[in-house]
Amino acid sequence: MSRPGDQVVRLTDLEREGILNSIERASGEVGAIWRRVLLFGSRADPARRGGDIDLLVEIERADDAVAYRLKQRLRIALEDELGEQKVDVVIDDGGRSPKRRSGRLAVGVHGHACAGR
């Protein structure tokens, strides 16, 4: 699950790959450019058990319609990749401050910033 230099997160390698594949697919479909993906909530805390997957996807500045479409397409792509799991997605385009993390631990899906295309 973790690689040398990674921060520990409670995702399997298949889940990580599925999340990144989903983001690539969804962002390509709507024309968004993603910068990084952060996991927050209980799955970012190795001391906790269970929990849904909470993702914060940082994208280049986009209008509300692009961010909305990305969130919708990403939900579909995540279900295709991960099956029926509880996944919460927050999109941050650097504009309005999204409801996110608020003091909670957040780590990169790869333990570091994930570069988008």
Image (cartoon, grey):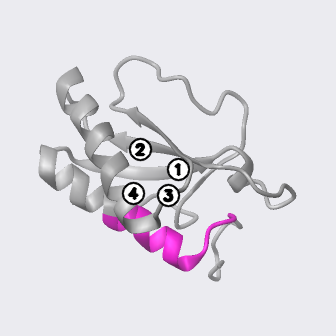
Mark 1 and mark 2: span between their CA atoms?
6 Å
Q: Mark 4 points at which residue?
A: 78
Q: Which residue lies furthest to the front in this view?
A: 84
Q: Position of residue 79 (x, y in %)?
A: 40, 57
Q: Where is residue 39 in the image (x, y as percent from the top left)?
A: 58, 51
Residue 38 numbered mark, or none: 1
User: Could you tell me how far apart the alpha carbons at marks 4 and 3 are, in whole angstroms?
Assistant: 9 Å
Residue at 60% across / 74% down in the picture?
A: 12
Residue reaching furthest right? 47
Question: Amino acid type of disc 2?
Answer: Val
Q: Estimate the spatial distance between the alpha carbons at disc 3 and disc 2, rounded to whole Å.
A: 20 Å
Image quarter in which the N terminus is found? bottom right
Q: How crowded is mark 2: few (under 14 residues within 10 Å), some or many (20 or more)?
A: some
Q: Earlier in the sequence, mark 3 or mark 2?
A: 2
Secondary element under disc 2, as helix, strand or loop, is: strand
Mark 1–mark 4 distance (CA, rounded to whole Å): 15 Å
Between circles 4 and 3, the one closer to the viewer is 3
Q: Determine which residue is flagged by label 2.
A: 57
**Magenta region: which residues?**
9-21
Against 79, residue 31 (above or below) is above
Q: Which amino acid does label 1 sit on?
A: Leu
Q: Which amino acid does label 3 sit on?
A: Glu
For badge 4, the amino acid type reads Leu
Q: Name the residue under label 3.
A: 84
Q: Could you tell whether 97 is left or right of 9 in the image?
A: left
Instruction: Please check the rendered image and state whether residue 19 is part of the magenta-colored stretch, yes or no.
Output: yes
